[in-house]
Image (spheres, rainbow, N blue to C red):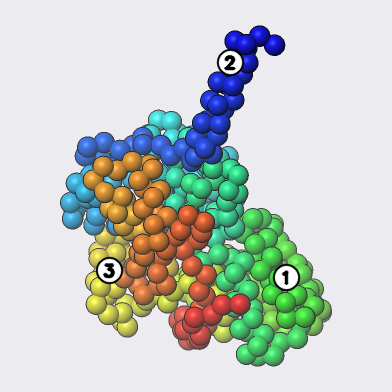
């Protein structure tokens, strides 16, 4: 081998070594930041099966943007929110994400809606170096990242995860009521499977056996077969990995059969629409929850003002979904502010991973991230519907 080749070989390997750490760095975009503006995007279901989530979440986000901008923005920059309708369809979510990344040049995707839709579209963001912040799904893929894949570090979640919250709620209910034959009915998708995982893990940890495990296809409206099966299997508590319509449908079916069983819903059932629409059918439902739902006649201080402002802006009562949307944007603003006047993608990442705590006005557990943990917290409550209202039963639960 000639001397010059040897030198070249050494130079190449030295170059390769210097490239290694750089290759493992997370690439974060600086697009969407100008002297006067920060462009952020979101995709919501505004027209599909979970628009009862998408519409109030969008409203909460708009309300936060208006407040932030009215107070002078983030270090002098106004937030510009780009909102796209996915219809809860993964294909539409992909197209919406491509548009926002390539045409609108969003700096971050904040509060995008739904497990199947976020899962389908998140790689578009990661490839472009766009942060995915606080999506409206608590599935594990939204915060667990493989350290060997640096682009996965772009995901952060501040919602209570389905697996952990289901485990904490199941543990509490089984211990408090001495149930022996736990069962589950879950939606056959990413969300439902996370609830199923939490259920299975906790049932195994408590040395119990599930008496019945049944699922339904997303969008289904008839649950007679599932309820009949669980009744004949002798369930004494039924965990529901359902959303709004399915929760009401399943409990209505049980009432029709005269089956008096305890129901425990995963966190998406803990919304005002369930008692408002389900009425007597859902009385007594327990649910895992992240924070107490405020009611206008009992709220105080900032929360009371917030509820009044929301009603004035949108002509509707605020709900859990509106709070989550509002908080997603307020959390973004908090960390963008921390990142300083000279905002860049890298500085935003550093601010998010700094361990600084964001506290909302609703008395939720604090939001805090680190370099190794991109999930805000796992502290769970259990609430119950009593006389058409959600009432706190137990807080500060872990498994």
Question: Which residue reaches farthest right?
Answer: 232
Is residue 284 shown left or right of residue 325?
right
Q: Nearer the viewer, residue 348 or 270?
A: 348
Q: Is residue 202 visible?
A: yes
Residue located 71% across and 87% down the image: 179
Separation of marks 1 and 3 at Cα, in angstroms: 39 Å
- Report helix, strand or loop for mark 3: helix
Residue pointed to by mark 2 = 8
Look at the picture and state if 383 lies above or below 42. below
Q: Earlier in the sequence, mark 3 or mark 2?
A: 2
Residue pointed to by mark 1 = 200
The nearer-to-camera label among 2 and 1 is 2
Residue located 72% across and 70% down the image: 200
- Report helix, strand or loop for mark 1: helix
Look at the picture and state if 281 lies above or below 98. below
Residue located 41% across and 75% down the image: 293
Crowd around label 1: few <14 · some 14–19 · many ≥20 (10 Å): many
Question: Which residue reaches farthest bottom?
Answer: 177
Q: Earlier in the sequence, mark 1 or mark 3?
A: 1
Residue pointed to by mark 3 = 306
Separation of marks 3 and 2 at Cα, in angstroms: 66 Å
Q: Position of residue 105 (x, y in %)?
A: 38, 34
Is residue 26 shown left or right of residue 335?
right
Q: Nearer the viewer, residue 334 or 46?
A: 334
Q: Nearer the viewer, residue 127 or 47?
A: 127
Q: Position of residue 199 (x, y in %)?
A: 69, 71
Residue located 66% across and 69% down the image: 198
Residue 252 in which image quadrant: bottom right
Verify CB contact (< 8 Å) between mark 1 and mark 3.
Answer: no
Q: Position of residue 196 (x, y in %)?
A: 69, 66
Separation of marks 2 and 1 at Cα, in angstroms: 58 Å
Verify CB contact (< 8 Å) between mark 3 and mark 2.
Answer: no
């Amino acid at each position: 081998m000639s001397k010059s080749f040897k030198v070249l070989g050494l130079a190449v390997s030295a170059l390769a070594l210097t490239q290694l750490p750089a290759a493992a760095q997370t690439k974060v975009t600086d697009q969407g930041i100008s002297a006067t503006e920060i462009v952020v995007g979101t995709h919501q279901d505004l027209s599909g099966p979970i628009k009862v989530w998408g519409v109030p979440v969008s409203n909460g986000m708009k309300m936060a943007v208006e407040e932030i901008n009215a107070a002078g923005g983030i270090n002098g920059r106004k937030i510009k929110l780009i909102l796209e309708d996915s219809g809860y369809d993964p294909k539409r979510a992909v197209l919406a994400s491509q548009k926002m990344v390539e045409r609108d040049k969003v700096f971050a995707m904040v509060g995008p809606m739904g497990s199947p839709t976020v899962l389908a579209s998140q790689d578009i963001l990661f490839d472009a170096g766009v942060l995915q912040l606080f999506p409206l799904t608590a599935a594990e893929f939204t915060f667990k990242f493989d350290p060997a894949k640096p682009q996965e570090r772009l995901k952060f979640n501040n919602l209570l995860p389905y697996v952990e919250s289901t485990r904490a709620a199941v543990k509490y209910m089984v211990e408090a009521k001495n149930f022996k034959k736990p069962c589950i009915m879950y939606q056959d998708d990413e969300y439902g499977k996370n609830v199923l995982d939490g259920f299975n893990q906790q049932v195994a940890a408590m040395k119990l056996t599930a008496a019945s495990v049944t699922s339904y296809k997303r969008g289904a409206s008839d649950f007679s077969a599932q309820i009949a099966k669980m009744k004949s299997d002798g369930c004494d508590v039924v965990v529901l990995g359902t959303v709004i319509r399915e929760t009401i449908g399943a409990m209505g079916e049980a009432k029709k059969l005269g089956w008096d069983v305890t129901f425990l819903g995963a966190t998406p059932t803990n919304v005002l629409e369930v008692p408002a629409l389900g009425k007597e059918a859902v009385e007594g439902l327990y649910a895992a929850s992240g924070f107490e739902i405020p009611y206008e006649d009992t709220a105080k201080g900032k929360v009371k003002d917030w509820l009044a402002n929301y009603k004035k802006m949108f002509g509707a009562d605020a709900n859990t979904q509106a709070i989550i949307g509002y908080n997603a944007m307020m959390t973004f603003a908090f960390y963008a502010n921390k990142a300083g006047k000279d905002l860049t993608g890298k500085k935003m990442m550093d601010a998010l991973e700094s361990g600084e705590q964001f506290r909302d006005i609703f008395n939720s557990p604090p939001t805090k991230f680190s370099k190794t943990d991109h999930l805000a917290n796992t502290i769970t409550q259990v609430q119950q519907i009593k006389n058409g209202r959600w009432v706190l039963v137990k807080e500060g639960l872990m498994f």
